[in-house]
Image: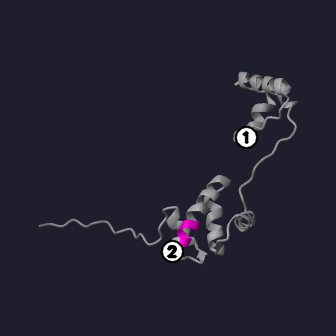
């Protein structure tokens, strides 16, 4: 693991370009062991999950679809990657156009994420003696 940090340091030294590291769990603990590497860090950012308000702002900026409040709540619990949100919106826009939908609801999203509400669990079968 130490070699990776040395390679990153060398790339930055040779190119003078800033380097962004992301997606590492417990990165603070790992880097704190390497003081010479930690001293080179300019800024540490921790990305948080999108709140419902964040998601509402994103949706208002990139799509003309209307979303019910329960749909936004549902979507906020299922997606936290911007790329996944964009892919879902592309699919929803096609579905809305095809089915002439005015508002995207939680049920529509559950169908998109294959979480159907109308599936009922059958009671266990009883033994039949012939």
Residues at discs 2 and 1 in contact (Cβ within 8 Å): no
Residue range corresponding to the magenta coloring: 93-97
Is residue 81 visible in the rendered structure shown here? no
**Image quadrant where one finds the N terminus:** top right
Earlier along the polypeptide chain: callout 2 or callout 1? 1
Give the percent coordinates (x, y) of residue 115.
49, 64
Task: Residue 104: name its quadrant.
Answer: bottom right
Residue mark closest to the camera, 2 vs 1:
2
Residue to which mark 2 is pinned: 99
Q: Is residue 8 magenta?
A: no
Q: Would you name the residue on which mark 1 appears?
A: 22
| Residue located at (54% from left, 77% from top) | 100
- Looking at the image, residue 27 sits to the left or right of residue 97; the answer is right
Q: Residue at x 66, y 55 (%)?
A: 80
Q: Nearer the viewer, residue 96 or 39?
A: 96
Would residue 95 be found to the left or right of residue 48 on screen? Answer: left
Q: Main secondary structure of the magenta part?
A: helix
Residue 9 coordinates in the image, percent (x, y): 80, 25
Q: Is residue 54 above or below residue 70?
A: above
Classed neighbour count for the residue bearing mark 2: other residues with Cα under 10 Å, few (<14), some (14–19), many (≥20): few
């Amino acid at each position: 693991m130490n070699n990776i940090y040395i390679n990153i340091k060398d790339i930055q030294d040779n190119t003078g370009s800033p380097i962004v590291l992301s997606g590492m769990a417990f990165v603070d603990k790992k880097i704190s062991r390497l003081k010479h590497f930690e001293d080179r860090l300019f800024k540490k950012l921790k990305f948080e999950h999108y709140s419902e308000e964040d998601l509402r702002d994103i949706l208002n900026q990139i799509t003309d679809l209307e979303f019910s409040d329960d749909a936004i709540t549902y979507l906020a619990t299922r997606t936290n990657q911007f790329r996944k949100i964009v892919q879902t919106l592309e699919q929803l826009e096609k579905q809305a156009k095809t089915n002439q939908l005015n508002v995207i609801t939680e049920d529509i999203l559950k169908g998109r994420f294959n979480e159907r509400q109308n599936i009922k669990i059958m009671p266990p079968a009883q033994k039949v003696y012939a």
